[in-house]
Image: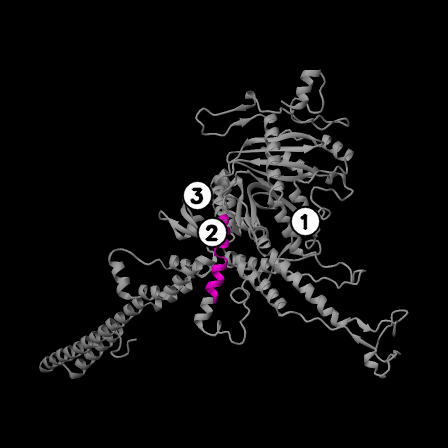
């Protein structure tokens, strides 16, 4: 029941919203009064499942009370414990506002010098961890299970990488990583939404005319009219995951959160505090999961009548870490404030409480609380956010960062350095000692090059005894030792060692980097210094990737998946993918963090030996005999993934052109063997033919001679017999060719 309905029921007067939950339209439309304050949750405000498998479902009035109370309790927990003081102190010393903001104080003390040990070490270690996670082009690899093919793994990898870039994964992990290194805990919020992306392209207002040319056939001709373009906008629905970096003081976990790097294990809820303006409320109202947000006319009236309404900061933590007026360090003005003159930029507080099953949101304005969301979500324990620490604290979800670990080292070095500078300053402005009553100046005397000072030297006339400098203080050697201990001790404490991490070589007698053993030892120590932080952050990255996998399988349209894959694969490859098998593919996610690269490097060293084994003819023959063959394309894909190259196998392997097929067929060993055999057979046939022809010639000559002899005996003229022989010879040559002249 809304507060407006409750009051109307008791007083007969409707205030604000109608029974539908949205304010009426018109010039006199008022913002809803909001939920009634119930004080305590009653039995009629909640529904519970009979089997205990689902969370209780609260009414809108109970949700407003529940979210607001949990928010107050979690905020008080941070503000009344040392977390707030530690974070504010770290924020102060990171920027180190100890230095004086004027050239010289009025009392003559020297200017204080600021030191930045915390800032240097935090950024040094942040670079180490970030490189350990994101040093590869893709920070993850998919390992097949259950017979998943290499093609499906590559398609999933391409799809996940595209979605990660849409969510600006590396950028947001970088922000959370910086917060983790400095303050101790990084926080990220995952989500999934559908957007209508407006894509712009140029289109000709008039198509190019065509003409048939004597040479070249029909061709397009550019004209002034056809070169006139217009901008065409096209709205395309796309799935966009988001990964929001959450600052300390804007996200509040359950006070019982005690499992570092895994809030889903012990925190029953997490509350996000955000600030929304007029346009934000319009966009939220368009989503199915939000309700009771007033219509545009009601919102317009409210924002115009309250152009500079000040909204309270979400917490003292946020006010100290994100407000330029409430902190000694430099920050923005604070996102809960409207610093402009646009009334529609006025900010209203939006509190969203996430549990493992439900999302509950209330809009806060003018002391009112309006429930605008109270439903189930499909994110599971991903809704409880991802966190990763620098150093874990026993029985606490929050961690301890470099700021707190190096705070005392920076204070000690800064203090000792400034005291040393004071003593050195005495050397440049040493006081003069004169005998009382003599040479007493009536005013300050400015000493300079080429100037004269008159003094009373005394009875002996030695002007050097008339005035002398105060003895200069000697700087104790312990001061330099303290400064060195503060500097290098702070570096060693957080792992930012000068040699192993920062790459600074030792002194003249150091041999750490002269041998391969020394180099490997230095590299190993550098890896050890960030082993745990890299592991914690890789857990968060792994959970994020599994979230993307779940959302793709549950929500992403197949056509959009195809569109993304077409940017890498050809249409023939896309058609060959069984998308039922694609959505149900089994694989695991392996984050390629720096600490896991050692095993990977060992595998890379084994690759040449594996290839030599596979190239042995005996091995290939054995597998061919048992009906198996080596898939070189799959092997090449594995090598591409191992080398971290963003290779496209489709661009390496392609179908032959007809000319290439013909050339290959002609040059293949089998074809050459067949051609050789044909040549041998042709030579044999030619020899046999010549032998037959020669034998036939001899037989014919013999026969003709016999016939001629017989005719001669029978008084037949010899000339006629010779003529018959020539005619037979000519007929044979016309039919069979001249012997020895055949091509």
Q: Which residue is painted at 66% across and 23% down in the image?
A: 3
**Residue 266 placed where, x, y %?**
49, 39
Q: Is residue 233 above or below residue 125?
A: above
Residue 556 visible in the current orientation = no
Q: How crowded is mark 3: few (under 14 residues within 10 Å), some or many (20 or more)?
A: some
- The answer to which of marks 3 and 2 sits earlier in the sequence is 2
- The answer to which of marks 2 and 1 sits earlier in the sequence is 2
Relative to residue 242, is residue 450 drawn left or right?
A: right
**Mark 1 — residue?**
231
Q: Residue 157 carries which label?
A: 2
- Give the main secondary structure of the magenta stretch: helix
The front one of 67 and 115 is 115
Magenta span of residues:
522-541
Q: Which residue is painted at 18% across and 80% down in the image?
A: 720
Inter-mark Cα distance, 3 to 1: 37 Å
The front one of 261 and 142 is 261
Inter-mark Cα distance, 3 to 2: 13 Å
Please tell me whether mark 1 sits on a helix, a strand or a loop: strand
The front one of 424 and 130 is 424
Relative to residue 439, is residue 622 drawn left or right?
A: left
Q: Does the magenta stretch include residue 530?
A: yes
Please tell me whether mark 3 sits on a helix, a strand or a loop: helix
């Amino acid at each position: 029941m809304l507060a407006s309905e409750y009051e109307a029921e008791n007083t007969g007067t409707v205030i604000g919203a109608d029974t539908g939950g949205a304010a009426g339209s018109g010039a006199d439309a008022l913002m809803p009064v909001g939920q009634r304050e119930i004080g305590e949750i009653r039995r009629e405000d909640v529904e519970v499942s009979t089997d205990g498998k689902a969370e209780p479902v609260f009414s809108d009035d109970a949700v407003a009370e529940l979210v607001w109370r949990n928010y107050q309790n979690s905020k008080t927990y941070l503000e009344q414990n040392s977390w707030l003081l530690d974070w504010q102190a770290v924020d102060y010393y990171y920027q180190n506002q100890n230095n004086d903001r004027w050239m010289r104080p009025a009392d003559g003390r020297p200017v204080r010098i600021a030191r930045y040990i915390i800032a240097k070490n935090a950024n040094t270690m942040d670079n180490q961890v970030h490189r350990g996670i994101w040093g590869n082009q893709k920070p993850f690899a998919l390992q097949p299970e259950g017979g998943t093919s290499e093609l499906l793994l590559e398609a999933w990898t391409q799809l996940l990488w595209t979605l990660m870039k849409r969510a600006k994964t590396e950028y947001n992990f970088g922000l959370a990583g910086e917060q983790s290194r400095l303050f101790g805990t990084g926080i990220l919020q995952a989500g999934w939404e559908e957007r209508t992306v407006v894509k712009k392209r140029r289109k000709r207002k008039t198509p190019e005319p065509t003409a048939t040319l004597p040479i070249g056939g029909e061709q397009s001709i550019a004209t002034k009219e056809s070169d006139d373009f217009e901008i065409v906008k096209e709205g395309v629905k796309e799935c966009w995951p988001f990964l929001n970096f959450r600052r300390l003081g804007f996200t509040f976990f359950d006070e019982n959160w005690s499992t570092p790097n895994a809030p889903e294990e012990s925190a029953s809820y997490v509350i996000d505090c955000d600030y929304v303006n007029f346009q934000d409320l319009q966009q939220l109202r368009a989503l199915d999961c939000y309700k009771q947000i007033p219509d545009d006319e009601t919102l317009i009236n409210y924002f115009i009548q309250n152009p500079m309404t000040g909204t309270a900061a979400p917490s003292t933590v946020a006010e100290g870490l994100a407000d330029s007026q409430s902190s000694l360090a430099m920050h923005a003005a604070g996102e809960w404030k409207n610093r402009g003159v646009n009334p529609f930029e006025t900010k209203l507080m939006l509190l969203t409480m996430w549990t493992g099953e439900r999302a509950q949101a209330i809009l806060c304005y003018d002391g009112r609380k309006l429930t605008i969301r109270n439903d189930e979500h499909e994110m599971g324990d991903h809704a409880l956010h991802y966190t990763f620490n620098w150093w874990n604290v026993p029985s606490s979800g929050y961690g301890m960062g470099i700021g707190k670990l190096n705070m005392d080292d920076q204070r000690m070095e800064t203090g000792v350095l400034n005291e040393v500078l004071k003593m050195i300053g005495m050397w440049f402005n040493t006081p003069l000692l004169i005998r009382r009553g003599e040479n007493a100046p009536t005013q300050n005397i400015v000493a300079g090059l080429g100037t004269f000072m008159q003094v009373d030297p005394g009875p002996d006339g030695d002007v050097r005894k008339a005035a002398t400098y105060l003895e200069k203080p000697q700087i104790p050697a312990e001061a330099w030792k303290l400064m060195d201990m503060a500097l290098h001790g702070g570096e060693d404490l957080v792992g930012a060692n000068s040699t192993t991490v920062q790459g600074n070589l030792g002194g003249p007698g150091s041999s750490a980097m002269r041998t391969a053993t020394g180099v490997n030892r230095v590299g190993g120590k550098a890896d050890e210094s960030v082993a745990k932080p890299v592991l914690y952050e890789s857990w968060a990255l792994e959970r994020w990737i599994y979230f993307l996998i779940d959302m793709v399988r549950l929500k992403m349209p197949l056509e959009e998946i195809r569109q993304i894959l077409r940017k890498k694969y050809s249409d023939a490859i896309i058609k060959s993918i069984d998308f039922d098998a694609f959505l149900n593919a089994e694989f695991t996610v392996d984050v390629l963090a720096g600490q896991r690269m050692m095993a990977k490097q060992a595998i890379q060293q084994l690759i040449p030996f594996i290839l030599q084994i596979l190239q042995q003819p005996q091995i290939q023959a054995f597998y061919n005999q048992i009906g198996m063959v080596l898939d070189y394309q799959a092997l090449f894909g594995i090598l591409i993934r191992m080398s971290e190259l963003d290779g496209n196998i489709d661009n390496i392997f392609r179908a032959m052109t007809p000319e290439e097929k013909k050339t290959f067929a002609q040059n293949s060993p089998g074809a050459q063997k067949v051609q050789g055999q044909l040549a041998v057979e042709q030579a044999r046939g030619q020899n046999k033919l010549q032998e037959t022809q020669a034998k036939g010639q001899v037989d014919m000559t013999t026969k003709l001679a016999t016939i001629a002899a017989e005719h001669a005996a029978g008084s037949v003229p010899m000339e006629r017999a010779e003529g018959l022989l020539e005619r037979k010879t000519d007929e044979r040559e016309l039919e069979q060719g001249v012997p020895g002249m055949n091509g």
